[in-house]
Amino acid sequence: MIDGWRVAVGIAARRGQAAVALALGIAAAAPAQAEVETFKGEYTVSYLGLTIARSTFDSRFENGRFSLQGTVSSAGIADIFGRTRGTASASGTFAGERTQPAAFRMNYTEGRRKQMTALRFRGGTVVGNENVPPLKKRGSDWVPVTPAHLSGVVDPLSAGVVKAAGPGEVCGRTIRLFDGEFRLDATLHPAPNSSAVREYGDGVVTCRVTVRPVAGYRKGRAALDYLQNRSRIMIAFAPLGTTGVYAPVHATVGTQIGTVTVRARRIDQNR
């Protein structure tokens, strides 16, 4: 389903020095609907009540397949520190209780710095990983990504495609996520809905998220330690039409210097 969700959260995390692309998403269950359903959505990312980024997405679900297109750009006070823009796309299929991505691509620009990441998957395993410019050489304090880390993973956008038989099946799962460099496990735990998510309707489900860095990071990094051991991360999901897919509509991520909030301003089904 989803948009530049990971990119937007990545911008927010960097502005808050959480320094991690949180990919706040999860994979899935149940077969897809046979008919075509498409959606358009708009998100805002805010820090301490100030908008720092805006994101849009287009998603398409047809006969067990999905495709996602997203954009994100910095906004408001964040532009003072330099313009940030990004586009992302992903495609894949549903296989039983799993979301299986086929391809992912992200182009990201921050000031004069540009980065492209492209991933290819086969059977849930990464078989192609391209970064332009290439990733920097890392030191001895770096936890390297091994082939074993690249099996049974999803990309940041596909991680937001939550396929579930019903609201009670959305949480209670662990997502193995890879963004081209960083491997992260995110576990969703059932949590009560807050008043902030009531506007999204009766089908909203809230999950508390705990994360565990796996590989592709520097040991002893304070931001990662905070993220794993002290941050409070909450994500609310709402159903998309009759697809059986649940999309993130509201998230809060605690960082060392404050809370980042990602909120869906609107999600419309194309008719």
Image: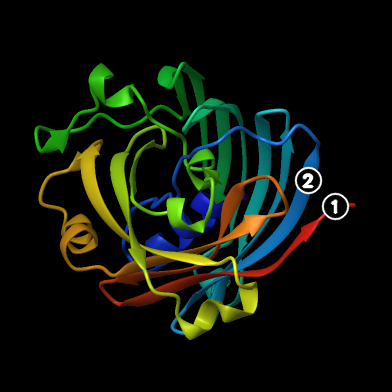
The circle drawn on residue 194 is none
Q: Is residue 88 left or right of residue 261?
A: right
Residue 246: image location, x then y, percent = 57, 53
Q: Residues within 10 Å of mark 1 (few under 14, many from 20)?
A: few
Q: Residue at x 60, y 72 (%)?
A: 202
Residue at the right extreme of this rendering: 271
Asked if one can make out residue 247 in the rendered structure from this viewpoint, the answer is yes
The three-letter code of the residue at mark 1 reads: Asn
Q: Can you say which quadrant of the picture contains the N terminus?
A: top right
User: Which residue is under mark 1?
Assistant: 270
Residue 40: image location, x then y, percent = 76, 54
Q: Residue at x 40, y 19 (%)?
A: 125
Q: Earlier in the sequence, mark 2 or mark 1?
A: 2
Which SS class for mark 1?
A: loop
Which SS class for mark 2?
A: strand
The colour style of the image is rainbow
Q: How many marks?
A: 2
User: Which residue is under mark 2?
Assistant: 38
Marks 2 and 1, how far apart at CA: 6 Å
Question: Mark 1 and mark 2 in contact (Cβ < 8 Å)?
Answer: yes
Q: Residues within 10 Å of mark 2 (few under 14, many from 20)?
A: many
Near-viewer residue (214 or 105) = 214
Q: Residue at x 25, y 68 (%)?
A: 231
Q: Residue at x 26, y 26 (%)?
A: 149
Q: Is residue 121 placed above or below 104 in the rendered structure? A: above
Q: Hey, which quadrant is residue 161 in on the image?
A: top right
Asked if one can make out residue 170 in the rendered structure from this viewpoint, the answer is no
Residue 205: image location, x then y, percent = 49, 64
Q: Is residue 129 left or right of residue 38?
A: left
The three-letter code of the residue at mark 2 reads: Thr
